[in-house]
Image (cartoon, rainbow, N blue to C red):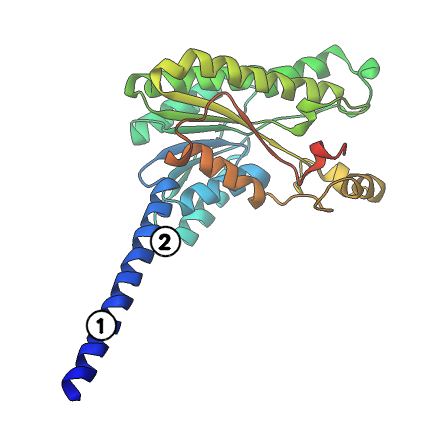
Amino acid sequence: MGAIHTTKADGGGSVRRRESQRRQRKEEALTKLFDLTGRIAIVTGSSRGIGRAIAEAFAQHGATVVISSRKAEACAETAAAINAAEGREAAVAIAANISSKAELQRLVDETLRLFGRIDALVCNAASNPYFGPLAGISDDQFRKILENNVIANHWLIQMAAPGMIARKDGSIIIVSSIGGLKGSPMLGAYNISKAADFQLARNLAVEFGKHAVRVNCIAPGLVRTDFARALWENPDTLKAVTATTPLRRIGEPEEIAGAAVYLASPASTFMTGQTIVVDGGATISGG
């Protein structure tokens, strides 16, 4: 009887080992799909909001991230927080103002000096100095929106892309907005710039595709960030937005970060020129 009992026990152990091995293989396959280990990424506007959430998520998935925004102190604080959370040198700070072509060039040059390459570029920083109908916008305000939200992205991509093209490997992500998909009585100029970002991604995807460099957009809905504070802190605006959004709420910065991880990872290697809408369903419900 003892021998029979041992055989049954061994058989049960074998089954458990096989199940454990299957689970391990599944976990490894899932991890590899979204693995950014060893990748070097620049994320603009990453000292707060959506940009910071993307930088944190990239670091959590193994990347080394260059934190960049206008204020050096804010960049350094964010990089230090990420390094402390990850227990490694997962982030460095290189401040740059997107309105300055020279500063963007320094951002790319310094990243290349430190790491030798750029694997992923996230153009997240943007500005909106005017809130109101297009009839009231000044030329300088309209020009600033287009320069910071479209032309600056073009500059930075042109600076970072040559290395990606040479290696035939790279992912470029532009953080646009669902505003680029519809009209607005108060955000017309901003929405025009975000619609232009969609086309910038599409056109560059065509140009860079033969070099295996991908260009995609993310279009968030209303997200709880300082940039959008004027919208979500207004009770009437918040009520109107959430009433027609299927999920009945606005988004959080970290809820946009997953799309960026996907677009920068092996999981999306056959995706280019596209826009991922992350808006709680607002655009499909007329919100």
- Mark 2–mark 1 distance (CA, rounded to whole Å): 42 Å
Q: Nearer the viewer, residue 282 or 191?
A: 282
Q: Establish if 92 lies above or below 166.
A: below
The answer to whether residue 154 is visible is yes
Check the image and report above or below for 63 versus 13. Answer: above
In x, y percent, where is residue 176? 60, 26
Which sits earlier in the primary sequence, circle 2 or circle 1? 1
The answer to whether residue 47 of the structure is visible from this angle is no
Q: Amino acid at mark 1?
A: Gly
Name the front one of labels 2 and 1: 1
Badge 1 crowding class, 10 Å Cα cut-off, few under 14, some 14 to 19, many 20 or more, is few
Disc 2 to disc 1: CB gap under 8 Å: no
Q: Position of residue 143 (x, y in %)?
A: 67, 13
Q: Position of residue 151 (x, y in %)?
A: 56, 14
Residue 134: image quadrant is: top right
Tell me which corner region of the image, top left, top right, bottom left or bottom right, holds residue 41. top left
Q: Amino acid at mark 2?
A: Gly
Residue at figure coordinates x 49%, y 15% from the top left: 155
Residue 213 position in % (x across, y down): 38, 21
In front: 215, or 144? 215
Q: Secondary structure at mark 2?
A: loop
Residue 102 or residue 269, whichever sits in front: 269
Q: Secondary structure at mark 1?
A: helix
Question: Viewed as shown, does residue 235 lie left or right of 145?
Answer: right
Tell me if mark 2 has few (under 14), some (14-19) or many (20+) residues whose alpha carbon lies within 10 angstroms of its own: few
Label 2 belongs to which residue? 87
* Residue ID at (31%, 20%): 168
Which residue is identified by label 1? 11
Q: Residue furthest bottom?
A: 1
Residue at point 33%, 43% (across, down): 32
